[in-house]
Image: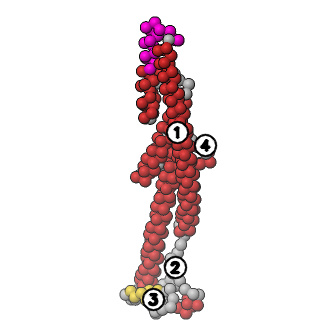
Amino acid sequence: MLQPTEIRNTNLIQISVYSTDPQEAALLANAVAQEYIQQRISDAQTVISKGLDQLRDEVAQKERAVDEAYANALRLRTEARIIDPNLGSPESGRRIEDSRVLTDQQRANDSGSQIATLRSRLEQLDRLKSYDLTHTAGLLNLNDPILEQKLPLYQSAIAEKAKLLNSGLGQDHPDVKAIQTQIDAIDQQLRQQIDSLRKDTVTQLAIAEKTASARYLDARYRYLQERKLLDTAKTRLSSETTERTMPQKPATIQDPAEPSAFPIRPKILFNRYLGL
């Protein structure tokens, strides 16, 4: 009863239904055509859905990249003590802590720890400049061999002077003067070493902070670039969503079937003329 035929050099499909009941033939032909249209619409919607899902995945990936870049830049900004209100914030509130982010975080933490250690060392050295070296056992925490060697000698000489004074000898006694001379010499050596250590620490801190600032600027640039890529992906998704969800007709019925006692064929030449 049913015979579909593609018309060469056109987009037409001729659906022929033969029946002793003309009404039945027309009904079947139109029903097949309608079902074909619905199937084409369903297929098109499936393709559209897959395409939009891919675009949504792309946007999600860009959002994660923005989150990662922002988190890294924020850590480096804090580490370098940089005031940058223009850094902004990512559009989404998520923070993805994958292995890549954790690696960046570990590097930032290591660098930040180094800067913090140098700053603490510098503060300690600044305090030592005005402290009585008699009570600065903390010098040994600076891990400097000269200080570790000289400080015990200095403290021993101080103790020896106190012992002499307690025995009744005066400040002008030759033995007391001799030990004082020794104390003064060691004190000068200690303070010279402290000054030397301070200068070295200032240099190391400046280098570390400069490096941290450069790393932050690189991270900030990467974050801004990721933001641009995210904006582009979102714009594309919005545009494609609007375009692909607009009503579409992948197929139409040009000549609906009508009951007839005689065969009725579509107007093929006329439809070809219309470019169908």
Observer able to see residue 275: yes
Q: Is residue 221 above or below residue 32?
A: above
Residue at 42% from the left image edge and 87% from the top image edge: 4
> Which amino acid, mark 1?
Thr
Q: Secondary structure at mark 4?
A: loop
User: Counting residues from the N terminus, which is met first, the one under dot 4 or under dot 1?
Assistant: 4
The residue at which mark 3 appears reads as: 6
CA separation, marks 4 and 1? 24 Å
Question: Which element type, helix, strand or loop, lies under badge 1?
Answer: helix
Residue 153: give x, y in percent of width and height.
43, 25
Q: Which residue is mark 1?
A: 201
Image location (x, y in percent) of residue 59:
50, 60
> In the current view of this chain or complex, which residue is farthest to the left?
1
Does the magenta run of residues contain 160? yes
Distance from disc 4 to disc 2, alpha carbons, whole Å, reads 64 Å
Q: Which of the two residues, 192 or 14, is positioned nearer the viewer here? A: 192
| Amino acid tagged 4 | Ile
Disc 2: which residue: 252
Point out residue 37 in the picture as x, y percentages from the top left corner.
Answer: 47, 76
In terms of depth relative to the viewer, which is nearer, 183 or 7? 183
Give residue 167's position: percent from left, percent from top.
43, 8
Residue at 50% over, 86% down: 11
Residue depicted at x 43% and y 12%? 163
